[in-house]
Image (tube, rainbow, N blue to C red):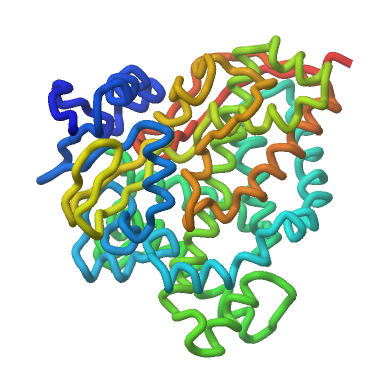
Amino acid sequence: MASTSLDQPDVTTPSLYLDGIPHDRFAKMRNAPGLTWHPYEASGFWAVTRHADIKECSKRSEDFSSGIGHTNLWDLEADALEARRSILDMDAPEHTRLRRLLAKAFTPKAIRVWEDLTREIAAELLDDYLEAGGGDWVEMVAAPLPIRVILNILGVPVEDADFLVELSNYIIEGTSDQMSLAPDAYGNTTELRLLPFASPASHALFEYGERIADERRAEPREDMVTLLVQLEDEGGKMSHNEFKNLFHALILAGNETTRTAITHGAMAFTDHPDQWQRLVDDPHLLYQGVEEVLRWGTPLIHMRRTAAVDTELGGTQIAKGDKVVMWYSSSNRDDTVFEDPFTFDVGRDDNDHQAFGGGGPHFCLGAFLARMEITVLLEEMMARNMSFDSRGEPQRASSNFVHGILSLDLEVSSLD
């Protein structure tokens, strides 16, 4: 049975998220029978808000396609979809092929190679932050850590980190109602509808990726960009358009979502100092603490799929071509799965959160990397016995896609 009588619940207006996730609206949909039809643009979508339904939808990739339509909320013309198609917007066998090419670089064993470097970066950033007595956590810690790590993995000059964070910020604006760039920014001449997130910053990131690729063709190195270029040059393994969009996705996903989790972690520990002290007193809780930071923050708010066949989900009949949107921020507060879901608890066991998606073939490729970065950062924070106090309200992103924090002003000291 479908639910269509919830007074037109709105969870898509970006400005709603300036006050945080609209949890009351999601709870209303979770508690209604079936799925909820949500109007959007000229049509709408089925809102998938319960944990179990998202898990099922994620695993049934043949029924709920990533490749038929765009994985963001809005529809695209066929040429725009092809121009903007990344690994996120593919089904098997194309998705399987690209994922296999990348998988070895993101296994736990491969990621552990980068742990020492991550620790050096985290230690440097935290020492500078402590010396300054605090400041904007996003600018000084959360943003530079993951971008510097992913740039080292890719083999991209680390001195370009600030520029790439700038581009990422502007790209994410494409999910908001507050676009600040002119269409021709960064020398863009491409129609915005053909660019990821309709942002001229995507043009700049494409151009940057092309330049790095040309450099690696001329002078190969032991890095991921060289690997990707060689796969493209070998013919058939990766097309040029796939390389462009994959580089774009790796830069964006490799820094945006992890910095969001790191920022929400700092906010949570500031708001719940007892949980921070609990972690400091018992480092054995670190694994659970990392998972709780991920559940609590849920950096990615949603993903969309398109029904490839007439089917059923959550007690609702879904027609071929219907859109379904999985709302991870809702599923991670589902009280049928999480006891006291609105309580931040670093000792939470059996934390089956969906911060990396609901499973299935599109489970986040960078999950191990994100976990490693958050773990190392928390270890270094614990080693310094850091104490946090808020200096004001966080500045949130006007986005229904990324649970972003633009700035977070904290006062910090060491209790040693």
Residue at position x 67%, y 32% from top? Answer: 290
In the image, is residue 12 above or below residue 102?
above
Residue farthest toward the left in the current orientation of the protein: 42
Q: Quadrant of the N terminus?
A: top left
Which sits in the foreground, 55 or 206? 55
Q: Position of residue 128 (x, y in %)?
A: 77, 33
Residue 346 shown left or right of residue 75 in the figure: right
Residue 9: which quarter of the image? top left
Which sits in the foreground, 175 or 407? 175
Q: Quadrant of the C terminus?
A: top right
Residue at position x 37%, y 38% from top? Answer: 53
Q: Position of residue 333 (x, y in %)?
A: 45, 24
Which sits in the foreground, 227 or 284? 284
Residue 176 shown left or right of residue 248 in the figure: left
Which sits in the foreground, 94 or 41? 94
Residue at position x 63%, y 16% from top? Answer: 270
Tell me how many marks there are.
0
Q: Position of residue 277 (x, y in %)?
A: 76, 14
Residue farthest toward the right in the current orientation of the protein: 416
Q: Position of residue 268 (x, y in %)?
A: 60, 20
Residue farthest toward the top in the current orientation of the protein: 274
In the image, is residue 135 above or below residue 358?
above
Residue 28 shown left or right of residue 130 in the figure: left
Residue 180: which quarter of the image? top left
Residue at position x 30%, y 43% from top? Answer: 325
